[in-house]
Structure formats: structure tokens, C-alpha cells
Image (cartoon, grey):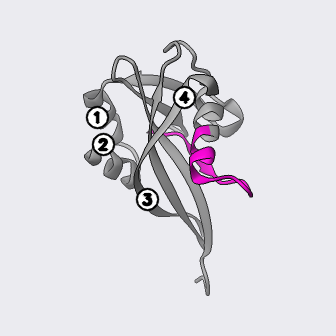
Amino acid sequence: MCKDNKYIEAAGGVVFNRDGRLIMILRRGVWDLPKGHRDQGETLEQCAAREVCEECGLLPEWLTVGDFLCETVHQSAPCEEKHTSWFRMEYLGSPGDVRPQVEEDIVDVRWFTIDEAREAAAESYESIRQIMKLL
């Protein structure tokens, strides 16, 4: 048992394209939303944008970070509590601008309709299901 949990700060994006489709990543057999750890000196918005671009292969010049959606909290590892700030984003580049970040075990990146995303999230993590309820 842990005496103290390590606090991990992260951020991610709920990214929509011009067609109103939502991007999701397939990692370790589960559809997820792009997110990651905040680097020192980054704002949460900067972190979210960087992680989305890295994990999905999107071009940063076409990505706009919008409103804060929510914060989720989960145990990311023994003795690690991950707090993720989620932002709504818009991507105005080509929907074909996707490339999974294989170094992070991401094997697929796809644009889903809201209904398809909710269906995929039903088999995902609790935090992702929580976010889908907000959309």
C-alpha cells in the first residue's frame, strides 16, 4: 500500500474536425482519447495540443484549443494518481492528416461520429466514458 500517491499532471484533447467527427486512438486494444504528461514549463493547453499532435500525427498549425471540458482522475500506476485536464479542440486540416505514434503503442487513429465514439468508449476506460457523457 502506498503512503503517498505521486500526483501526475496531464492534459488531452477532444478533437473535432470540420465534419463534426471526433478523433480517437487505439492503444493496447482500447479506443482512447489523446492525452499525456505535462512537461515542465508548459501550460495545460500547450500540453494538450502537443500530445494530440504527437499521438495522432495532426499538424499543429491546423489545431485550435478551445474551452476546458473537465478534469478526470485515475490511478495510472501503483502509487500514481493521474489528473488529466481535457480541452475541446478543432482541427481544420485534412482528415487524412493522421499517423499513429507507434512509439506510444498507438496502432490506429480514426475520426468517429459522436455515436460511433460513444460506442467505442463503452469498451474504454471509465474516464473516457465520463467525457463522452459531456458531448
Number of labels in the image equals: 4
Q: Amino acid at mark 1?
A: Glu
128, 54: nearer the viewer: 54
- The location of residue 53, given as percent across then percent down, is 62, 31
Please indicate whether residue 59 sits to the left or right of residue 40 in the image.
left
What is the quadrant of the C terminus in the image?
A: top left
- Tag 1: Cα neighbours inside 10 Å, few (<14), some, or many (≥20)? some
| Disc 1 target residue | 119
For image coordinates 65% across by 54% down, the residue present is: 38
Marks 1 and 2 in Cβ contact (< 8 Å)? yes
Earlier in the chain: of badge 3 and badge 2, it is 3
Query: What span is in magenta?
Result: 31-49
Residue 63 - label: 4
- Tag 4: Cα neighbours inside 10 Å, few (<14), some, or many (≥20)? many
For image coordinates 72% across by 53% down, the residue present is: 39
- The location of residue 121, given as percent across then percent down, is 35, 40
Q: Amino acid at mark 3?
A: Glu
- Tag 3: Cα neighbours inside 10 Å, few (<14), some, or many (≥20)? some
- Whether residue 32 appears in magenta in the rendering, the answer is yes
- The location of residue 35, given as percent across then percent down, is 56, 45
